[in-house]
Amino acid sequence: MQKHIFNWEIWPDFAEIPNLHQPVMCYEKVKLGETVSLGGRSFTPLPVSHVVPAVGYHVDSGKGSLVFSGDTTSCDEFWTAVNGIKRLKYLIVEAAFSDAERDLAVLSKHLCPSLLAEELNKLKLQPEIFITHLKPGEVELTMLEIGERVQRFVPKMLQNGQTFEF
């Protein structure tokens, strides 16, 4: 984040504002599986598989949970972690490509509808499922293919500004 975004070129470095002794933002490393509590919620990074280092997140309010996969492809460790979550209400998972671009999805370690269907077969819980990371120009096709390939669930497209209460 600091190298690529908060670098004085894209955004100010908030780790230096207003000064180094009282920054607006501090960075702390969080290990995979380590839970951090903020504002009455707990956040736990989950394992995923992507071409660059990445994690998903489990957010727990104490009353319910949400999981966000982030960028990923097939990852049994992710599903093992997800299946161990109590009160999972929402799962937000990516499907970046249509099935016509399955080879590109595999190469770039993303999901397409057929791969998503295979991955969701590993899910033992019954959360509401929302799809993100859809490529512009392929949104309708990808969602149509997801509807055709995913059998046990009825995934919906994640909407801009959508709010989740749990």
Image (spheres, rainbow, N blue to C red):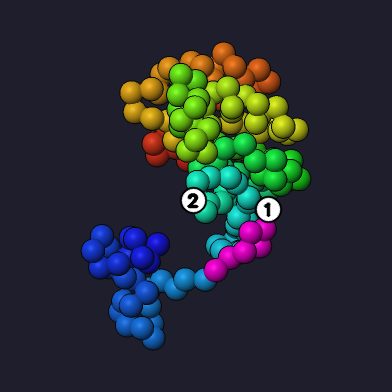
Q: Main secondary structure of the magenta part?
A: loop
**Most foreground residue, 27 or 39:** 27
- In the depicted structure, whether residue 79 falls above or below residue 37: above
Relative to 23, is 110 on the left or the right?
A: right
Q: Amino acid at mark 2?
A: Val
Q: Calculate the distance from the C-alpha at mark 2 to the C-alpha at mark 1.
A: 31 Å
Q: Farthest residue in the bottom direction?
A: 21
The image quadrant where one finds the N terminus is bottom left
Magenta residues span 29-35
Relative to 97, is 152 on the left or the right?
A: right
At 70% from the left and 27% from the top, the residue drawn is: 121
Q: Amino acid at mark 1?
A: Gly
Q: Farthest residue in the top direction?
A: 148
- Image quadrant assignment for residue 5: bottom left
At 43% from the left and 17% from the top, the residue drawn is: 141
Q: Which residue is the site of mark 1? A: 62
**Most foreground residue, 54 or 57:** 54
**Residue 52, numbered label:** 2
Q: Is residue 33 magenta?
A: yes
At 53% from the left and 45% from the top, the residue drawn is: 50
List x then y, in percent, for residue 150. Answer: 62, 20
Under circle 1, the secondary element is loop
Label 1: few (<14), some (14–19) or many (≥20) C-alpha neighbours in 10 Å: few
